[in-house]
Image (spheres, helix red, strand yellow):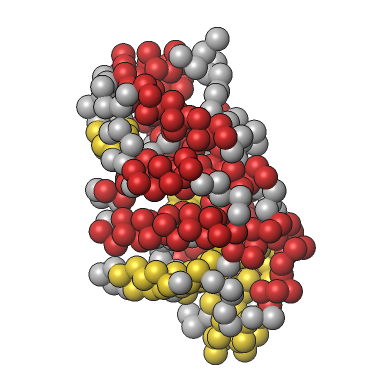
Amino acid sequence: MTVNISLPDCSYNINIDSLKTIQKNAKVVVVTNPTVAGFHLPYLLDKIEAKEVSVVTIPDGEQYKTMDTILEILDHCFAHKLNRSSLLIAFGGGVIGDMTGFAASIYQRGIDFIQVPTTLLSQVDASVGGKTGINNKYGKNLIGAFHQPIEVNIDPYFLRTLPKREFGAGVAEIIKMAVCFNKDFFVWLENNRLDSEANIAIGIEKSVQTKAWVVGQDEKEQGIRAALNYGHTFGHVIENETKYEKYLHGEAVGIGMVMANNLAVKIGLMTQDEADRIKNLLDSYEIPTTYEIQDVEDFYNHFFLDKKSLDDKIKFIVPVGIGDCKITDEIKKEDVVEVLKGFTR
């Protein structure tokens, strides 16, 4: 199956099928990590036809999503004399995709890159839409650029070697899409496990179609695309507090969704029953839904470092029932604080 994203300055395909041959009459660099390379690198290299192919392997983990790692990628590109006609291939999960895209956006002021996502989270969300970036001590993805890939190749074959926790992290993003935009899809998820190849193919397809539709309307996140950050405003603080070591990104988002749901219940946008249904679905895939906040005021102040916040206002994405959501900067601090206190001892 092919899903197309049409944007003002570019258009590209998201291919959901067995990996096709990647042809490039130029130098190609594959960016990956040791885990993915150990399982699947020969499979990918067999599918590349280019003037020259080289591989740069960078450390595995969110904590390595830094400028130092970007410099490793760029040094490899300079050493192999890439030019503006060259191509980078992101071969891994969301961390690899974000860093490869960012490196491509700044190497010689911008070269092409292709996404070949290997985790469920990156297949259903991170690889689509052109967001690239790295973390710093102030927060997640605060340094980066919008740089669209020229294509995305999603091959469900890679999921066969995915650890259970990584799979659950991806499911959290699928549930996110359904809660924000598609109630019927959410009900389908309640009644169909994603453990089978047939069902996960449907889950990937529906999620990619949703993401493509949203990005097509709002590439630079000036409006509706911000809704895709449901769960992320809270989740990014959790990741920062735990130094990106305790939770996978999708796990932090799962906890953040529960926090956002509690806020939605607090201000009357969601019923407790709806919030419980979402939490139950997350729990059924063993996705974390609890977190112990040590300092509520400090947690709250971290929100101001979020990219969606402006001046002294915090922008929250809260669900409106199941199947819709609201982007607002008008939630009272005392309501947020009361919700956060529910996550303390």
User: With respect to residue 248, does 13 lie above or below?
Assistant: below
Residue under the image location 29 percent in, 68 percent down: 7
Outermost residue toward the left? 330
Residue under the image location 46 percent in, 14 percent down: 342
Q: Nearer the viewer, residue 324 or 202?
A: 202
Answer with the quarter of the image where residue 267 lies. top left
Q: Nearer the viewer, residue 326 or 92?
A: 326
Image check: 329 left or right of 4?
left
Outermost residue toward the front? 191
Q: Nearer the viewer, residue 127 or 28?
A: 127
For the question of whether residue 94 can be seen, the reply is no
Outermost residue toward the top? 345
Q: How far from the left and from the top, in percent, is residue 174?
A: 47, 48
Image check: 241 left or right of 333?
right
Q: How far from the left and from the top, in percent, is residue 5?
A: 34, 68
Outermost residue toward the right? 38
Answer with the quarter of the image where residue 214 lies. bottom left
Residue under the image location 48 percent in, 80 percent down: 84
- Location of the C terminus by quadrant is top right
How many marks overall? 0
Q: How far from the left and from the top, in percent, is residue 77?
A: 61, 72
Q: How far from the left and from the top, in percent, is residue 71?
A: 60, 60
Residue under the image location 54 percent in, 66 percent down: 154
For the question of whether residue 260 can be seen, the reply is yes
